[in-house]
Image: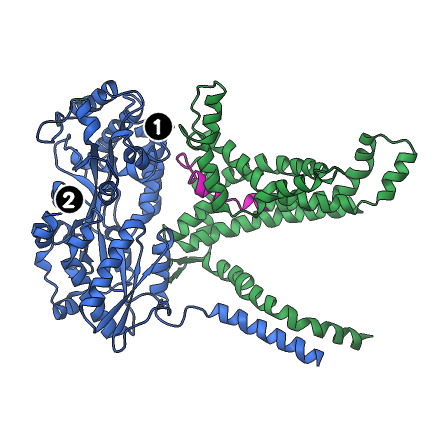
Amino acid sequence: MKKWLSGFIGLVLLSLVLMACSGGSESSGGESDVDIPEGATEVVMWNLFAGGDAEYMQNIVDAFNESQSEYFVNNIMQENAEYYTKLLTSIGAGKGPDLAIAHTHVLPELVSQGLVQDLDSIGEEVGVKWDEFNQNILDATIYEDKHYAVPMDTHAQIMYINNKLVAEAGLLNEDGTLKMEKTPEGYVEFYQTLRDTLPEDKIPFAFSSSGSDPYWTWWTFYSQMGGRGILTEDSLENPKYDLDVDNAVKAAFFVNSLYHDNEIIPLNISDFYSEFQSENAATMNTGVWATGTWESTDGLEFTPMPIPTIFGEDAAWGSSHTFVLPYYQKADEAAQKGAVEFMNFAADHGAMWAQAGHIPSKTTVVESEEFQELPYRSEYAEVASYVNFVDRNIYARGLEEIVIRHLDTIWSGEATPEEAFAAMETEVKDLIGE
Amino acid sequence: MNKKLWAHDFKAIPFLLPFFVAYVIFTILPIFKGLEMSLYDWTLVRKLDFVGFANYKDMFVDPHFWRTLWNTTLFVILTTPTMVLLALGLALLANMNTKLQTFFRGSFFLPSILSVAVISFLAIFMLQPYSGLINTILHTIGIEAEPFWMADKTLAWVSIVVVTLWWTVGFNMVLFLAGLQDIPESLYEASEIDGATRWEQFRYITLPQLMPIGRVVLLLQILGSYKVFAQILLITGGGPGGATRPLIQYIYEVGFTQNNLGYAATMSYALFFILLILSIIQLRNQRSGES
């Protein structure tokens, strides 16, 4: 009896372990706790959004599910930090979603590894109108003349000002524009006036001293100076190092001067968003996605605007969220068609997505009354047409990590811009095998 | 006798088997898979070409490998002695026959049960400039400086080491405490009769008796410190500018953002090899110490 019992317990434990090992193979990356309406084809979608963005995306999914009964989009949130690792490996293993979201800079990796499929034939069937999209955004999704993604938006880095504080410093014209000469000197002078005029506890420019944000601003000024990228764009797999070093260094000196020489940006603010939100800061730079947060903050009077063009060309850092169709050898054609139907629906309903702050990808949506009626958004929608996307190559994620790490050594005062870019060159060449 | 032993052992098999299966699947197999990976050009998605020892050759001339390995070693050097000595001190304190005994034990061990995300969040909260607890205290006592604990190279190391000490020292303390309680009371009684002072008791009874557990603590501490990653990633992100980036963070970045699992596996093997050598040296020492 005892032997029987111990054997039985052993078997139960063993089966538990084996069940744990085989978990997740039930459907294509789906979760089974959602009720799929009878007769509808389930389209499993993975998304990487959090906070407000996630909520607006869910609204679009709900609207789509209510608008028809043929398909049901099952929107599954994924942890942002691990999103791409999980997406790449799961599609590779044939267990990924039917529909996924990807940033433009990750598309080359997905396309080159054959993890996504082109949308031309299904797009035609569904009736995707490619000519309604903003060409600058759409171009970033075309590879060898094929459409590999339906873009949803551009999210550029822009400038936000606190109307009250900037007006208090006498730097706001009557029409709400800035009293700023559009030159590097004028830009710095604008901030020096803020610094000297505002009470001492107010911050002229709330910003991070490390990470993505200063990288984006550096990229914006580098692009304004005529710098195009870091690598050549002739080949996804074998690009060459092509940094315009003079302008890269010049842009880095300029950004660095805002921290150190001119003391416009206080160093190492732990949360610059909250400084702006609590009206402690006159200005800040960040992605358009902050608009949704600022407008729901009581009493915050702000104006979003493109980062002023102070170095010649209109340019800005920006990326774009796109929808992609993962490639499977034995793909469920009904689910794929449903996925593209949803992509089309979401692009057409870009005004819903714009509530988060993003600039819709379709010019028809930007021109629509629904979008124009949204406050603030139209003030920066023009940025979409001159955003300088990062280089198209399969190394974009690794490249970004290297560039940010080296730029950080400049802002922290550990390296001069010349030193940092020299060190970066070696490391980037190493990465791309040049 | 043999038959009895077999029957006796057989009963244990069903109980051991589940763990054994899990151990094989999740530990043994990945170890060999990793070795295979290190010999290939391998992306997140698929195995590409066999490259032999090319990844290993690259590793020896990769400055980032050496820099992050040095960062990790620096962390080991900074934390190990303090971690062992502090744990011993705390264990002695927690072993004293006072009313505060339970309080000491609880409060020293408590941080160890928190997850790395929680302690990192607390650390960031306390260390941030302008409004963080530490700087506010400094300002309150009249020090007007604004140290950037997480953004200055040296201070970032100090912060990481102190946070790690606070977080993990309790575990070592418990091991020492177990060791202390294993020392027979009769040794102290006998020494008291011989007129030994407290210091002599500590020097000639407690310390030698604690040596075996001390060696275990030392070994575990070195191995643990070499695997440092999560709290650095969460507190400084390896910054400023890579100054605190440990080897495992570099391995993680190469594998998962640079999409080069082959090379990441190679560096994991290098770390494995270093830990293996350290363990062998330590175990030999232990044996010679025991004999």
Residue at x-position 26% and y-position 58%: A58
Left or right, B275 with respect to A60, comes to: right
Residue range of the region highlighted in magenta in the rendering: B224-242
Query: Is A87 rendered above or below residue B206?
Result: below
Task: Provide residue B136's location: percent of width, then percent of height.
Answer: 45, 26
Query: Is B195 rendered above or below residue A328?
Result: above
Q: Which chain is blue?
A: A
Query: Is B129 rendered above or below residue A75?
Result: above
Residue occupied by mark 2 = A377
Label 2, residues with CA under 10 Å away: few <14, some 14-19, many ≥20 = many
Which quarter of the rendered picture does the N terminus of chain A lie within?
Answer: bottom right
Quadrant of the image occupied by residue A259: top left
Give the structural element (helix, strand or loop) at label 2. Answer: helix
Residue occupied by mark 1 = A267
Chain bearing mark 2: A
Question: Looking at numbered disc 1 in the image, what kind of residue is underneath it?
Answer: Leu
